Amino acid sequence: MRVLQLVTAFQYRGAEIAALQFSRELVTHGHIVLYASLYSSTDDFVIYPGIESKCLNGRKHPLLDTSLLKALAQLIKDFRPDIVQANAGDTLKYAAIASFLQSKHYKLVFRNASTVSRYMRSSAQRLFNRFLYSRVDKILSVSQESKRDLLAVFPQLTDRVKVVPNGINIATVTRPTPHGSVVSLVHVGGFSFEKNHLGLIRIFQRVLVEVPEAKLNLVGQGSLMSQIREKVSEQGLKDSVHFHGATKEALKFIAAADVLVLPSVIEGLPGVVLEAFLCMTPVVAYDVGGISEVLINNETGWLIKPGDEIGFSNAIVEAIKSNDQRKLIAARRLVVDKYDVAKLAVQVIDEYNFLNR
């Protein structure tokens, strides 16, 4: 098969990394993949060998960049894919409209990686998205919760939605990495409202009361980074909070941390949780999206009621002081057994094959 994987930008964020990992598995199975982005990126993003790539260099527009739409339509015409997979963000908008405007010879798949209801703020948005989803042949949700949320808004899609979670390359970490002597907390994610960095700073301040030597490492970049930097400076936390930007080495930060923290207000099924499990790094997270499908409270980590900042900070302190290997071993086993990307890619290929019958 010829598969066009469409992502928002070449950047080290969840949807892009997951699409790239699946792309590598597709190539391993003998398929041809074109990994294309709508927008350019300043990240030093590395495409795996054997995967063709293309950046369309569009410009972000509140409605539609017609030049970008034309470029995508031409790319599809030239590449002649059997499958076009749109991976979160604006990709669905451009892929669906392109399929509407041209003679569609391919199947359109959408990777649903979030909770769409949080973005439906008006009847006009619902109507427009109803049109976009009408052009999609298959929707692959990353979690049961993402599927439930989507169908709560668009119940007519019931027969087109299947859950295939994100996975990770379990060979990436062959054994747990010993943690250093400094108490290190890590958060990996773009600086956007979904990730709740302001809430994380408040939580971290509570942690410092109990563990004053703790350091918080923020890995990622985004439009709200300057605001968070200002907040850190205002609160006198510059010596305790470190900004590392977006990096392909995020796994090293996770492996070296004492705790991974994830106080998001919106999530699908975040790959960083699976990576932390694989590294045997304790995880504290809010119970949002599909997180509870992998993070089971007191079994594979600490799952906190959304908005409970006191409970979140207490759980971090407990995770720092705890040496509960039972949780860590159970979490790692879960990833190895159920979230190996090589196994999950077979499910994706099966869905592609079914569409092309």
Image: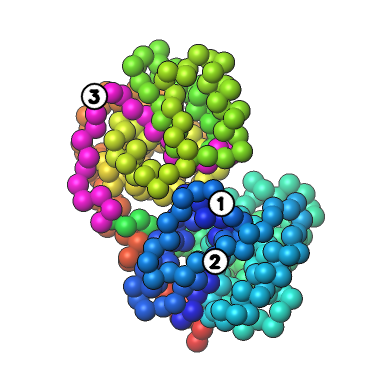
Between label 2 and label 3, give the one nearer the viewer: 2
| Label 2: which secondary element | strand
* Residue toward you, 322 or 60: 60
Residue at position x 47%, y 17% in the image = 237
Q: Which residue is mark 3?
A: 181
What is the quadrant of residue 250 in the picture?
top left
Tell me the tag on residue 54: 2
What's the CA distance linking mark 1 and mark 3? Answer: 36 Å
Q: Residue at x 29, y 40 (%)?
A: 255
- Which badge, 2 or 1, comes first in the chain's sequence? 1
Query: In terms of sequence position, does the residue under pointer 1 or pointer 3 come before the other?
Result: 1
Residue 317 position (above or below residue 70): above
Compared with 302, 292 (above or below) is below
Name the mark on residue 41: 1
The amino acid pointed to by label 3 is: Ser
Find the residue positioned furthest to the bottom. 357
| Rendering coords of residue 294 (x, y %) | 38, 48
